[in-house]
Image (cartoon, rainbow, N blue to C red):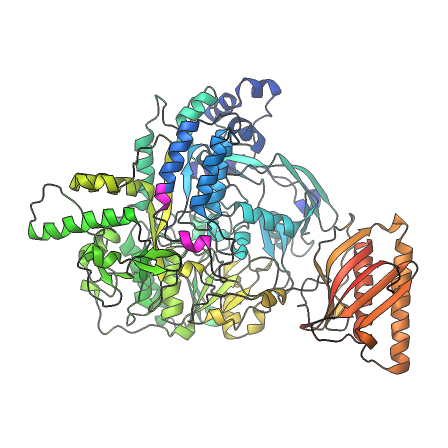
Amino acid sequence: MAFPLSLSAALLLSILASLFQTPSLAKSSIPSRRQAPPALSSRDVAQDACGTLFNWLQANYTVFTALQVYDCLIIVPLNHTVATQFISYYKDTLEFQSTLAYLKDPPASYQQPAVDLLAGLDRIQGQVDAGILTTQYDFELAVQTLVYSAHDSHLQLYAGLTDVFSFGSPFYVSSVSEDGVAIPKVYFTEDLISAQQSGGQWNASAIHTVNGQPATDFFTQFAAENSQGYLEPHADWNNLMYSPASDIQGLVNAFEGSSPFYPGDVFSLVLENGTGVPDLTWLAVINDLSNVVSIANYSDFYSYFVVDDYDDYTAASARRKKRDSVTSPPTVSTSSTAPTQTSWSDTFFPLSLAYPQNPAVVEPNLGDGGVITGYFLEESSTGVLSIPNFSSDDVMAFSTTVGNFLQKSKASGVKKIVIDLQQNWGGLTLLATDTFKQFFPTIDPFGGSRERAQKYAYALGNTYTNYYNASLLNPNQSLSVDYSNSVWVAPLFLDAATGQNFSSWAQYFGPHQDGLDYFTTIQRDNLSSIPFDEASLGAVVDGYANRTNLTAVSPYAAEDIIILTDALCASTCTLFVEMMHHEAGVRTVVAGGRPQVGPMQALAGTRGARYYEAADIDSDIFLAEAINVSVTADLPDRDIEFRIDIASFNLRDQIRRGENFPLQFAYEAADCRIFFTPQTFNNYAALWQYAADAIWTNPKLCVQGSTNQPSAGNATDTVGPTAAEKASWAVCANDGRTEAGNIFHPRALSEPLRPRAPIPVKIPCIWCAAASAIYLKINYFNGGEPGNGISPSVIKMLSDTIDQLDAHIAKHGDGVIPHGAFDHQAMGFSWYSVNVNNHQQTWGVVAHAVNALLTFMLNYQSFGMAQFLIFDGENQVGTGTLGPSFSRG
């Protein structure tokens, strides 16, 4: 399973308590802020920013300016010996990461950049040796940047200084489309909610620029650098946006305050209505209130958080407690004295009223271990099952709640089902299988996986499996070992090719070559084994062993079920969707994504099959050496002075039946993509109905270009969208809604308000010609303001060119431009365009193209030189320039 970043209840409460009310942004341009301590003086910094920081923490401050925390982090020097030992330890750990070779040389279907993790660690070691990295924080940032570049939420590192504080914004943002068709814009979440509550008396204004950069560019870059664990930029983007499904779990996204990367001191915004919001302060929070201790200076800070060498700190026991709390299977309880919540609004996190307050089904102890709710949208006979994660404290209560929902749905005449998996970060793998089996009891899900075949895995597996086989012959072994679900005991698992248990580690290990690496034989879990189920889940999986029901039937057909995600579905969640979508045929809908048309993957969290931790490897090695001391020479040294809370990785790839391609690298577009709107982003009943309508009654609600994608079916797409397909997802910048190549009807749209501040030109830019399918892709533009002296000449030249072209068409009709080139010079400027791709420009095409360039300049009030491509519908027909006049010979 993967574990998302979250804040403790006490910390969240302290943050919420520190919020103070201010007028709405649309009225005052000042967002609500989290209160931070007074600014540090230069004297404080010079003495020791760390001591001052922790004095404030002991005075019950938990939120600081980013600069206050950075001033402490950056003064902690790097210890070469400790850093070098960590690199060696971490390199050995990453030998177990299943995707190393594919990350280094990914297939075209993978939507993130390639990365060589082991070479990256070598580069960091080289920087340590050369004295380039001199502070502990810079060293850790280099490591974290490398970890983030794997885009795998099973590969996480919570360690050292970067595990103490996180950075974020003083406000929330949301990305919504005004009508579900227009390209989304980013707004202050508070403004959108206030605008709704105003009854239409005023409208929220979108964020136009951040630090002078177009908002889309800023948030795209911020997402790429700070979102962790997602397989494509659409999901990175969604990870910055406010989500009620995140609220109810107490999660914090990358923009709100979970990033280890210092974002700077202050930033400024300009809204589309011209309102400026200057001098906003980036904030920082402490991640764990148990870390509030007496720290006098940076030396104490280093001793406490980096090397566990602090007298008052029991770091090892704290780490064990933290690890056990998130990795141990929950116990099965039979009763509870905790009060039962009737809806999410009754729980500790009523941060929004997005969820209906009248659920039909509620898991016991909702908000305190329980997570499932179910709803009936009576007007459409649609039922909704909300599963924000698969990590319930009481697995039988979880399973029973799913069953109760299905029973009540059938009894109430519900015809269609929406399964909402927004913000589902994973959980217990077998709980997802249990849920699937209640929907489709006659399907035995494949659940194939494999691990990287490398020397350490062989040594561990061979040792454990041999000892296990010997224990079957001699139960009175000297060591008591719990084998029930050990990943190193081959006979516990099934050979996917034969369906029989492996007999030896050699049979399991292989190895089998795939590309540039070697892997074990594809295996399946033996779900009919009661000891395995109970050790892994805490209960027997529905449909297996003593919970088998041979007469069970599917309560709903696959075509009557849809799954809704926000692309952040990860780990166990992706295993669940793999079963529901690929094996049963349920369709998927994904919401949100970057502000562009085109498809989007429903599952962009990690698709790895097995989460594992370095601490688990440490324990495995310790026991293996106790079983057989001679194996010590074949295993790595696990001594480590560096404090690590969690160093996790993906042990096994998820593999489909009859394949050997890791699903982590496949492209899997959703059957339909929808944009959030002001009516749906904070009203889930409306969102669920919108998703249901998009699939069952009104496919036009799906984003342009997002349907009928080849990868939405059962075939594994190892290629992904082509460059031409990606180019076709562009929309006209004129209105942000018309797909380039379609006929552009500007008169059907209301005129936008002219911003008070100049609009920065975003290049490349798609600009469409009115009443035609012709558009320009402007790749270069060097313009100036109206008073730059050349604007009258440019306007006059382009206007005269249009007049001459119109006059030619009126007299001679439209036709092909002679000799494949159009050259017109006047007022010291020249328009020159030529045919390309065996297509030909016509007089009408060029007239529309010239008009498009003129309207582009007039819109941005910027005039100058340009280079552009000319398209007529889907075809590029020309390329051209607007520049100074000169002789072409």
| Closer-to-camera residue (592/273) | 592
Question: Residue at 44% across / 40% down in the picture?
Answer: 122
Q: Is residue 132 visible?
A: yes
Q: Is residue 329 visible?
A: no
Within the magenta stretch, is there residue 107? yes
Residue 237 at x, y = what percent? 55, 53
Residue 726 at x, y = what percent? 59, 64
Question: Residue at 66% across / 68% down in the picture?
Answer: 739
Q: Which residues are magenta?
A: 92-110
Is 115 above or below relative to 414? above
**Residue closest to the far front:** 889
| Closer-to-camera residue (640/1) | 640
Question: Residue at 48% across / 30% down in the picture?
Answer: 136
Residue 774 falls in which quadrant of the image? bottom right
Say left or right for 334 vs 250: left
Which part of the image, by quadrant, shows the C terminus? bottom right
Within the magenta stretch, is there residue 754? no
Is 414 above or below relative to 643? below
Residue 644 at x, y = what percent? 37, 35
